[in-house]
Image: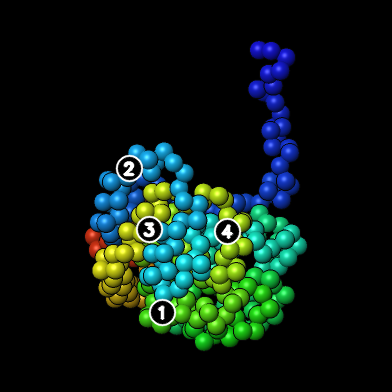
Amino acid sequence: MTALDRNPAAPAGFATRHLRRDILAMAGYTPGEQINNCIKLNTNESAFPPSPRTLAVLKNVANDELRLYPDPVFRRLRAAAAERYQVTPEQVLAGNGSDDCLTVIYRAFLSPGDRVACPWPTYGLYDTLATLQGVELVHVDYRIDQHTWHLPSFLSKQGAKVVLVANPNNPSATLTPIDQLRQLAYELDGILVIDEAYIDFAPDGSSMLPYLNSHPNVIVLRTFSKSYSMAGARLGLLFGHPELVSQLMKVKDSYNVNVLSQALGIAALEDHDHHHQLVTGTIKERQRLERELAVFGWTWPASAGNFLLCQVGSRAEEIYHGLKKRGILIRWWNRPVLSDKLRITVGQPAHTDLLLQHLKELV
Ligand SMILES: Cc1ncc(COP(=O)(O)O)c(C=O)c1O
């Protein structure tokens, strides 16, 4: 030990004392549990394998592709996304998951003290990013009835620079009609982010993407984590006005999408047939799950996603823990509005069978 060596028995808090106070005080985002050897019906991943073309990409990675940095502006991926979604490459930015695209949006539009608004309950990361950026988050409650969750009025009147709407929403899987979103975009003096992580499971015509050119203040987010079965690759897309996108390019990390994920994304986008099968297979299994869960007397708002938010009642927590003990993870939140509900991801048919078998014993 020299005089320069710090005492390993430094008092608690010594190492962290230079951190920002708001970081020390915040709880941090809680991702869904990842426990080995459990059946995972808790994080809305796809139940089915990704396109075989993506696996072929992995086998064919050349030495040089790993040795060199990836394309910082993902030209080939942008072109493939533009073709797939009928936009121009200049309207596309890619991220390390759509979470990364959200971070770019917060960084680019929001200074400490600004306001961001979203209907509530929704995806919890919107809150975490607000704390990290030092901005105020306004929750405006969804109007909830048995069949659906309605977008609250006055979302555009919250003095927010950015309004975020997940459509379909997480955790409810409910869909806000496109005309309501267009009305909101029209009224809002700010940026409207439509997070379409689950849109491929919704009926055709539900996406805001075809209206992008009519609403220069709208940003649409998509992910490969759900309908493309590539949550592990971390890849998301952001679509917006070309002028916005070129500014956002300055804000993202330089090499925010690695070489493998860029190549995987292109392969997945080009395999229309496989994507179609993934979506239709998931919807079919969701319909079966709905028929089977109805037996327990549970209800849920109409789902446009790959999950159901079941109204379970006072035993929700107990059933969540009971399933966990039996190796099946679903999602339960100890929070107002959600504590009497369970969110269940559509799984593989064999996993649905196991879930139902255990539920019959527990409920
Ligand atoms: C509404 C919503 N947006 C974004 C994400 C994150 O997607 P990604 O895996 O692309 O970061 C999720 C993940 O569950 C989500 O539910």
Residue 292: % across, % down: 28, 72
Nearest to N terminus: mark 2 or mark 3? 2
Residue 301 position in % (x across, y down): 44, 78
Q: CA distance from mark 4 to mark 2?
A: 27 Å
Query: Is 142 in front, or is 240?
Result: 240
Q: Nearer the viewer, mark 2 or mark 1?
A: 2
Q: Earlier in the sequence, mark 2 or mark 1?
A: 2
- Give the colour scheme of this rendering: rainbow
- Please report whichever mark, 3 or 4, sits nearer to the chain's N-terminal start: 4
Question: Within 10 angstroms of label 1, few (less than 14), some, or many (20 or more) residues?
Answer: some
The span from disc 2 to disc 1 (Cα, nearest Å) is 46 Å
Q: Where is 305 relative to 246, above or below?
A: below
- Residue under circle 3? 265
Cβ atoms at labels 2 and 3 below 8 Å apart: no
Kindly identify the residue that appears in the image at 67 percent across and 64 percent down: 109
Residue labelled 2 has its Cβ within 8 Å of some atom of ligand 1: no
Quarter of the image for the N terminus: give it: top right
- Tell me: 150 left or right of 147: right
Closer to viewer: mark 3 or mark 4 = 4
Count up the numbered dots.
4
Q: Is residue 243 visible to us here? A: yes
SS of the residue at dot 1? loop
Give how far across and how far down residue 344 sits, in percent.
Answer: 39, 65
Which residue was labeled with disc 4? 249
Q: Which residue is mark 2?
A: 62
Local crowd size for mark 3, using a 10 Å CA cut-off: few (<14), some (14–19), many (≥20)? many
Q: Name which of mark 4 and mark 2 comes first in the sequence.
A: 2
Kind of residue indicated by mark 2: Ala
Give the label, 1 or 4, closer to the camera. Answer: 4
